[in-house]
Image (cartoon, rainbow, N blue to C red):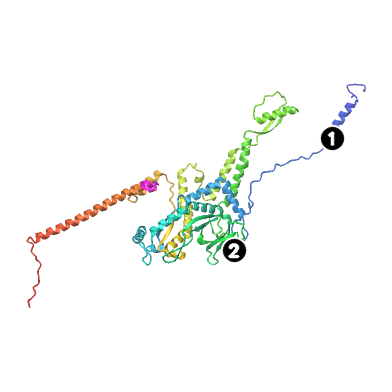
Amino acid sequence: MKAGYPGNWVDTPYTLEAQQVNEQIKKNNSKKVDSTFIAVSKRQPLRTEVTGNKSLAASSMDNLVSVLKPDQLKQCGLAYINNGIVRTIVDRTVYFINPERTDFVIEPNEELTSGVDDEEVKKIEEQIKNDTLTGENGESLNLKELRRKLVRINKRVRLHSQLDKLLASTLIFGRSALEIINFPNTTNEEDGTQVKGEPRALRHLSSTRIRDIIADEKTGMFQGLEYDEQKQTTAGTRIIKADKLIPAFNDDYNVLDNSNFSGLSAVWPILEAANTIDVILAEDMPEVARQGWSKFGFLYAGTSKKSTINRLKEELEAGTFIVHNEQALTADVHDLSLDPTKLIDVIQGLAKHMSIGMNLPLFMLFEDTANFATANQVMQVYKTGVLTRYRTWLQGILEDYWYDPILADHLGIELKDVISAPIRIKAVFQDINFETRKEIIEADEKLQNMMVFTNVDTAKDIDRKDVANRLQLEQNEINKAVRFQRDMDIAQQFADNKTQGVQDTKKANPFGRNTTKQSKVPSK
């Protein structure tokens, strides 16, 4: 030890080792260390294979092409299956187009009524109603049998439910078709002619299996399609002609090169919005729910004993309060959760975008609209605009591919001659009223006061068919009584006139002499 302590250090092995450690620490601290940042990878949404590339390469004019490829059509179908908003929009559109069982009316051909006054048109309609209308050669058209046949066929093939499938598939994929399956043809025993079998069923064809469309090269008219049966045979596809089909094509405007009869999917423009909602519901919402009760944080147990650390871990997982005597126990808690209402706002915004993109009023998807009057006006515009267009489109399909062939078989004429037949069969749909029952009754009451409507018309407007039938029967009985009383009055008046005439004759000739002058004939 050096003299002069405490100013001098004691040189011992321990102090030398401590100095060396301190010097090494200073050297390490003096070194420049580059900061390292590791970015947390962001989750990628469920993108489709065609995201950001929805174009179609120019097609050849030698054959017709489809706007969407099979894998893209499959994505539209999966969106309908997985996303409740897409399914709701498609289903409600179908239900509005075809709400109840599809009905029909038999009415005069426009060629017969064009340029004819109202009285003549009313006469033709009365002949159709009473089945007294005849053809060019005076033969009976047998319209009662035609009505029974149409009702029987529509029930047999379940026309209403099959049309729902046709409409839904057409909106989802852009095009669809029903194949008409007929009974075998029979032979008429009287004249030996062939009688075409009635429709037996309507088979719904899968839109994704439609391979090619066959069209006339000159006129461009639809002639049939090539359908893939997906059978393990050498000929997996077959040609189905147009007279065996009820096809439908949505927004078929030949927008892309040579894409006639391709149709445009109504789901495709909103596909990414649907996928985004699926990601939020499948991943984000469950994560928010997990973080709602359990925060993210760091916990220092204050000890290195594994038994204490494990005990604290068990207590934290149980979510209970912890009573401890660890003085150094500290916790640093962070709230990384997202406000769930923000995600709900995103979903609602995307849902509105999807509703607008598929021509469905927002009121049909968000019923909590405060201003009912405004919503009612919107629904009226939807009814007279979009809904009328859809129904007119479906009417044309049914008349061309369903009712015209049945009418041609009934009249015994070629299908191309139906356009000049004296009658036609028209598909009709139930009218949709968005007014309340009170508003309908008040409006009909004014029409009754103006002698425009009757009680029967009002009962039909409020959808009370039972009341309408009862009122109609009562009105028929009243009309019969009125006609009977009128006939009795006429008969009584005729009898009175006859009696009065006899009395007048007796007064003019009280002795009953023959006052008729006879010409004298000279005797020979």
The answer to whether residue 141 is above or below residue 296 is below
Residue 460 position in % (x across, y down) = 38, 48
Q: Secondary structure at mark 2?
A: loop
Q: Residue sitting at 38 percent across and 58 percent down?
A: 144
The residue type indicated by label 1 comes to: Lys
Report crowding for label 1: few under 14, some 14 to 19, many 20 or more residues within 10 A (C-alpha): few
The residue type indicated by label 2 comes to: Asn
Q: Secondary structure at mark 1?
A: helix
Determine which quarter of the picture holds residue 334.
top right
Tell me if 412 is positioned left or right of 278 in this view: left
Determine which quarter of the picture holds residue 298.
top right
The answer to whether residue 215 is above or below residue 374 is below
The answer to whether residue 373 is above or below residue 27 is below
Discs 2, 1 touching: Cβ within 8 Å: no
Determine which quarter of the picture holds residue 406.
bottom left
What residue is disc 1 on? 27
Report the span colored magenta.
458-468
Residue 346 position in % (x across, y down) = 58, 43
Check residue 318 for magenta coloring.
no
Residue 128 position in % (x across, y down) = 37, 59
Residue 357 position in % (x across, y down) = 54, 50
Tell me if 135 is positioned left or right of 199 in this view: left
Q: Residue sitting at 58 percent across and 39 percent down?
A: 341
Q: Residue furthest front?
A: 189
| Disc number placed over residue 63 in the picture, else none | 2
Q: Tally the numbered discs.
A: 2
Report crowding for label 2: few under 14, some 14 to 19, many 20 or more residues within 10 A (C-alpha): some
Q: Nearer the viewer, residue 515 or 122?
A: 515
- Nearer to us: label 2 or label 1: 2
* Observer able to see residue 301: no
Q: Residue furthest bottom?
A: 524
Q: Earlier in the sequence, mark 2 or mark 1?
A: 1
